[in-house]
Image (cartoon, rainbow, N blue to C red):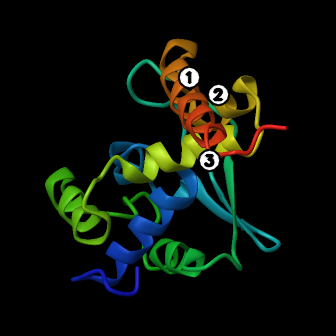
Amino acid sequence: MKSGKFVKPKHRGFVALLYYTGVRRGEALRALREQFRLEGNQIIFDVGKRLKHGIETPALNIPLGAPYAMEIWKAVEKTKKGERVFPFSGRTAYNVVCRVFKYPHHLRLSRITNFFSEGYTIPEVRSWTGLTLKALDYYVGLVTVKRMGESLGKEKR
């Protein structure tokens, strides 16, 4: 985030939103101002019905004190009611993420696999992501294979 090239201030908020939520690029791009609210020290983001056959999930919360979370809230505050918070094209969104992380799906992949690595259950991760069980199986497999490989380096008794 510190070294990425951000042409507009909202670009930084967009990347922070993807990082913390793991939502799809299109889900973030279509988000209207009304889908965000501040509750105490949390940004609440009501994603709505997920893309790609996803379900409607509970609203996601992002701690306002988390690094760069304030960039999300600044983007929301600079948006008029009824307008998109991130009013740029899918191609621009792709380019913004590429300039920071090189691999656009990295944010989503990392968020989901980290949840599984941290011990969250399939129903919990499904509630956060809206993914089907078949799609989640892929991410669970990645975490399992990684953990299995790491176990090879542990000393046996």
Is label 2 in a helix, a strand or a loop?
helix
Question: In this orientation, which residue lies closer to the viewer: 12 or 4?
Answer: 4
Quick check: 41 above or below 33?
below
How would you rate the neighbour count of disc 2 (Cα within 10 Å): few for under 14, some for 14-19, many for 20 or more?
some
Spatial separation of the CA atoms under disc 3 and disc 2:
14 Å
Q: Is residue 33 visible?
A: no
Quadrant into which the C terminus falls = top right
Name the amino acid, label 3: Asn
Picture residue at 66% right of the left edge, 63% below the top: 37
Spatial separation of the CA atoms under disc 1 and disc 2:
9 Å
Extreme-bottom residue of the structure: 2
Q: Which residue is mark 2?
A: 126
Asked if the residue at tag 2 contacts the one at tag 1, i.e. Cβ–Cβ closer than 8 Å, the answer is: yes
Is label 3 in a helix, a strand or a loop?
helix
- Residue 30's spot in the image, x, y percent? 36, 48
Disc assigned to residue 55: 1
Name the amino acid, label 1: Ile
Q: Nearer the viewer, mark 1 or mark 2?
A: 2
Disc assigned to residue 114: 3
Extreme-front residue of the structure: 157
Question: In this orientation, which residue lies closer to the viewer: 45 or 142?
Answer: 142
Residue 115 picture quarter: top right
Q: Is residue 17 visible?
A: yes
Name the amino acid, label 2: Arg
Q: Nearer the viewer, mark 3 or mark 1?
A: 3
Lower position in the chain sequence, tag 1 or tag 2: 1
Side (left or right) of 29 relative to 148: left
Quadrant into which the N terminus falls = bottom left
How would you rate the neighbour count of disc 1 (Cα within 10 Å): few for under 14, some for 14-19, many for 20 or more?
some
Quick check: 95 above or below 11?
above
